[in-house]
């Protein structure tokens, strides 16, 4: 047994939902698994995304050899532009994952300088003292892998996100055999996805939605709108196949939906028969019963295509009486209000709305994460000396630890770890060995120059340097009519150089936004506030290069 220390340092995702990122170190070599983001809670006004603090990696920058990705979900790759901007190291990922990464880096002007290296399941790559064997797993996305990492002290396995889907739509099977092989040879540690540890039984296969989808297609007499996450490739594939069977043309609405379907098509995951795909502008040329629209916006995001269609504010997507709208996705906690508001708008147009409403029967959506029995299955196959739950809030990690601890024959010891805590292995065993700085970095408006340090500091700085702008609008709640000219209150902002021209311009922007909104949008305060905030932000940044906190206030008349 070599002498030395193996350190595992989670930088995000353990004890919080999202921004998964983990460093693994042997001596002077560090590899990083995943670099995800987290979507901020709504109270973080003006913050668009949150990424992990990578101070630890920057302090050790000359030792970081590579970032290795498990799959292409945002909570695993979304932080890459910010991480690579600080630390340009090679990025390893499977073909599909790297296709998403390329789009993302291109958007941020980082693609030319990036070194992207293909990972192929079953083909080992060596990075410094580590040899990595990517193992195919199934999940709600395609081309996902777990990572078996051979270290001088033994093999550790990081599951990435997974469920054990025996019938994935792409027929690329979960490689249980390789997990079992490693189990036979002996595994030092298993780091396993905790997201669904609270669910008993097995998570249904991606194909489990087929009966419900078939029923919807059979019953729908008019236009059919299906909304799912743009990364739900299995779902998009099934919907397009059914559309073809039912002789419906397919239109894709929303940029992410288009990009993602195109990648899936290029890489052979989705097949669109010739003549099936139509441009959104052509929807009106076909009888309503001959069209299916894949549309983005399952979470009621105010600017999404579906939210806009729900209030008659989309150029091509018109919801008419008798149309059917399917939300094939989970209702992410925190988004309930926005989603149900959107569903109300859809019902108001006399559309049939089908969403995960907890009713029994065939599901319209299935989760991508392993339930208890699948988690136990993998633990049984791998039989690790140490088990460490990852990807979850504290209660999920805790319950996962308890589940593993109850499997005495299969698991040596169970360790609980949170982001920032260092887990150290040597020839004697494993123990916690100190902490490294971790935290959340808030990023405004998606530009990589807009990193804002700590939340509290961010708010304070925002207010002290850039001030606050309060647009005040009086809207009649019943009619949606704007009752008087918008007022704007500025504090700590106008004083620093803003003249009357800016004030007038800002008022005009608000008036314009209001004029371009339907009455129904104006009655939907969450939506109209967000529209005003975004338009005003664009105007103010453009004219002053400053970013005041903008908080629209609507007075009910
Ligand atoms: Zn995932
Ligand atoms: Zn994830």
Image (tube, rainbow, N blue to C red):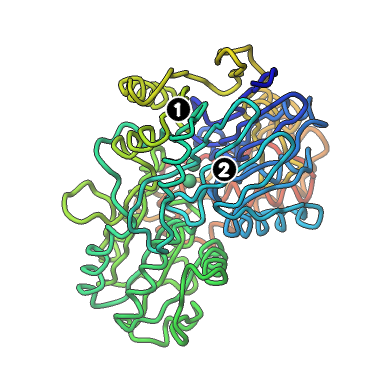
Query: Mark 2 highlights which residue?
Result: 76
* Residue beneath the point at 74% across and 37% down: 128
Determine the secondary structure under disc 1: strand
Quadrant hosting residue 422: top right
Q: Position of residue 225 (x, y in %)?
A: 36, 68
Horizontally, residue 148 falls left or right of residue 141, namely right
Image spot of residue 373 (x, y percent): 29, 37
* Mark sitting on residue 61: none
Quadrant housing residue 411: top left
Could you tell me if residue 327 is visible in this image? no
Residue highlighted by disc 1:
384
| Mark 2 neighbour class, 10 Å CA radius: few under 14, some 14 to 19, many 20 or more | many
Of residue 98 and residue 339, the one placed in the foreground of this image is: 98
Which residue is drawn at the image coordinates 38% and 32% (left, top)? Answer: 379
**x and y percentages locating residue 255 in the rendered image:** 56, 64
| Image location of residue 32, percent across then percent down | 66, 36
Q: Does residue 345 appear left or right of residue 149 in this picture?
A: left
| Of the image marks 1 and 2, the number of the one nearer the N terminus | 2
Is residue 393 in view? yes
Residue 505 located left or right of residue 326 = right
Image: 105 above or below 389: below
Tell whether 182 sits left or right of 495: left
Disc 2, SS: helix
Give the position of the C terminus as an image quadrant: top left
**Ligand 2: does it lie within 8 Å of the C-beta at label 2?**
yes
């Amino acid at each position: 047994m070599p002498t030395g220390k193996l350190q595992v340092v989670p930088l995000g995702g353990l004890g919080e939902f999202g921004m998964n990122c983990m460093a693994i170190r042997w001596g002077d070599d560090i590899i990083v698994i995943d670099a995800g983001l987290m979507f901020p809670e709504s109270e973080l006004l003006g913050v668009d995304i949150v990424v992990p603090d990578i101070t630890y990696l920057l302090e050790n920058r000359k030792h970081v050899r590579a970032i290795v990705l498990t799959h292409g979900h945002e909570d695993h790759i979304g932080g890459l532009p910010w991480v690579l901007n600080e630390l340009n190291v090679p990025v390893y990922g499977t073909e599909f994952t790297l296709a998403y990464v390329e789009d993302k880096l291109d958007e941020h002007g980082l693609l030319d300088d990036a070194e992207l290296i293909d990972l192929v399941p079953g083909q080992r790559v060596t990075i410094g003292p580590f040899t990595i064997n990517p193992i195919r797993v199934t999940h709600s996305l395609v081309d996902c892998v777990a990572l078996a990492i051979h270290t001088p002290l033994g093999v550790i396995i990081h599951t990435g996100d997974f469920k054990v889907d025996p019938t994935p739509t792409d027929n690329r099977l979960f490689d249980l055999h390789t997990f079992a092989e490693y189990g036979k040879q002996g595994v030092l540690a298993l780091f396993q996805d905790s997201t669904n540890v609270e669910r008993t039984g097995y998570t249904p296969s991606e194909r489990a939605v087929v009966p419900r989808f078939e029923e919807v297609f059979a019953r729908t007499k008019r236009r059919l709108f299906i909304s799912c996450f743009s990364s739900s490739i299995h779902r998009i594939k099934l919907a397009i196949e059914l559309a073809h069977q039912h002789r419906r043309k397919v239109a894709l609405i929303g940029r992410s939906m288009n990009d993602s379907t195109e990648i899936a098509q290029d890489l052979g995951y989705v097949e669109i028969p010739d003549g099936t795909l139509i441009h959104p502008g052509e929807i009106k040329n076909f009888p309503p019963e001959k069209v299916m629209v894949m549309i983005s916006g399952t979470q009621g995001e105010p600017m999404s295509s579906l939210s806009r269609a729900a209030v008659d504010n989309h150029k091509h997507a018109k919801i008419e009486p008798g149309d059917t709208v399917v939300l094939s996705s989970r209702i992410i906690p925190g988004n309930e209000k926005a989603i149900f508001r959107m569903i109300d708008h859809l019902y108001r147009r006399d559309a049939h709305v089908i969403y995960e409403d907890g009713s029994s029967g065939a599901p319209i959506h299935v989760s991508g994460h392993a339930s208890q029995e699948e988690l136990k299955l993998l633990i049984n196959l791998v039989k690790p000396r140490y088990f460490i739950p990852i990807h979850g809030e504290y209660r999920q990690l805790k319950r996962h630890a308890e589940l593993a601890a109850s499997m005495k024959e299969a698991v040596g010891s169970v360790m609980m770890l949170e982001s920032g805590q260092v887990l150290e292995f040597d020839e004697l065993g494993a123990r916690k060995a100190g902490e490294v700085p971790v935290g959340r970095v808030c990023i405004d408006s998606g530009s990589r120059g807009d990193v804002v340090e700590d939340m509290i500091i961010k708010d304070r700085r925002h207010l002290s340097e850039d001030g606050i702008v309060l647009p005040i609008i009086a809207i009649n709640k019943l009619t949606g009519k704007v009752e008087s000219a918008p007022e704007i209150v500025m504090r700590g902002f106008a004083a620093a150089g803003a003249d009357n021209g800016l004030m007038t311009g800002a008022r005009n922007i608000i008036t314009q936004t209001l004029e371009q909104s339907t009455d129904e949008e104006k009655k939907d305060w969450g939506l109209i506030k967000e529209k005003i905030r975004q338009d005003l932000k664009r105007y103010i940044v453009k004219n002053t290069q400053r970013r005041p906190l903008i908080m629209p206030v609507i007075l009910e008349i």
